[in-house]
Image (cartoon, helix red, strand yellow):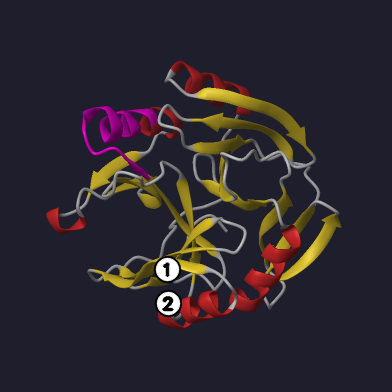
């Protein structure tokens, strides 16, 4: 399924956004970079949204860029997990040992959100849909296709997210599991990422589908990004990139004959 008009099931990665410095060199460059890399159409919201800019692919919301509101706010793609009740989910986060860094709040009529940190240090959002359900398009070139939690403590992460969202897991190997909703739907993965150094916190890594990994990586590099790594997976070739302002993400070319998740 590529497009969606109804709220995503609870626990599903349903949106992503990234905050940049508000002045010219931040948001201006980000809009230019991602519009050229993914062909996104940018649409800045009303004044009350504080410059929140939705990125559209084929006239469907695919992601968003926003100005930073705090000096120490990281430049990183944030994964939002769907919920039917933000306040109840936040209570579960606290009970399971997580932290709440932005309390539940209404975002005009678009929905209700909170920002949390899991016990392994990974930031994530929770989103209760209103007028905005989150992604209107996924799994198409130039849209989000996958989300992985990169953590140094896979066991603790599994326990936490199972408590909060009811996740179950398919153990692929000692270092990687896929995430399943209670109904068995696969919605992402978790990776024991021992290569994370002391300055790199645990994080939810966003993977964007592209038609061709190499050409997209080259375009990103020409636009000021750094290619951190290229590699081939059973599901297709992928490149780990870091944008000019520090945000890390991947571009991934799904193989037509890839094995089922």
Q: Is residue 23 magenta?
A: yes
Secondary structure of the residue carrying numbered label 1: strand
Say whether marks 2 and 1 touch (CB < 8 Å).
yes
Q: Nearer the viewer, residue 211 or 96?
A: 96
Query: From this viewpoint, is residue 191 visible?
Result: yes
Where in the figure is residue 65, as x and y percent of width and height? 34, 45
Quarter location, residue 260: bottom right
Q: Main secondary structure of the magenta part?
A: helix
How far apart marks 2 and 1 lie (CA) works out to 7 Å
Query: From this viewpoint, is residue 58 visible?
Result: no
Magenta residues? 19-33
Secondary structure of the residue carrying numbered label 2: helix
Q: Residues within 10 Å of mark 2 (few under 14, many from 20)?
A: many
Q: Nearer the viewer, residue 157 or 135?
A: 157
Where in the figure is residue 72, as x and y percent of width and height? 35, 45
What residue would you read off at disc 2? 86
What residue would you read off at disc 1? 127
**Residue at screen point 57% across, 56% down:** 121
Outermost residue toward the left in this view: 47
Q: Is residue 173 left or right of residue 113?
A: right
**Residue at screen point 21% across, 34% down:** 23
């Amino acid at each position: 399924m590529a497009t969606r008009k109804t709220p995503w099931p609870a626990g599903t990665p349903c949106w992503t956004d990234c905050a940049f410095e508000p002045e010219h060199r931040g948001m201006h460059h980000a809009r230019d970079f991602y519009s050229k890399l993914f062909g996104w159409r940018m649409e800045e919201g009303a004044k009350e949204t504080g410059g929140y800019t939705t990125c559209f692919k084929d006239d469907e919301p695919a992601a968003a860029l926003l100005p930073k509101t705090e000096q120490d706010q990281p430049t990183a793609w944030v994964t939002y997990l769907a919920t039917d009740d933000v306040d109840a989910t936040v209570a579960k986060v606290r009970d399971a040992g997580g932290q709440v860094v932005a309390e539940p709040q209404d975002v005009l009529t678009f929905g209700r959100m909170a920002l949390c940190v899991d016990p392994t240090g990974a930031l994530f959002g929770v989103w209760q849909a209103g007028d905005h359900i989150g992604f209107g398009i996924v799994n198409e070139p130039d849209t989000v296709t996958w989300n992985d939690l990169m953590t140094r403590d896979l066991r603790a992460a599994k326990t936490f997210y199972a408590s909060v969202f009811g996740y179950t897991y398919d153990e692929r190997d000692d270092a990687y599991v896929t995430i399943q909703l209670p109904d068995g739907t696969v919605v992402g993965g978790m990776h024991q990422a021992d290569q994370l150094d002391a300055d790199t916190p645990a994080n939810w890594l966003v993977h964007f589908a592209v038609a061709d990994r190499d050409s997209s990586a080259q375009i990103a590099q020409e636009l000021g990004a750094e290619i951190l790594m290229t590699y081939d997976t059973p599901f297709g070739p992928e490149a780990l990139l870091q944008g000019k302002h520090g945000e890390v993400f991947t571009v991934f070319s799904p193989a037509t004959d890839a094995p089922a998740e």
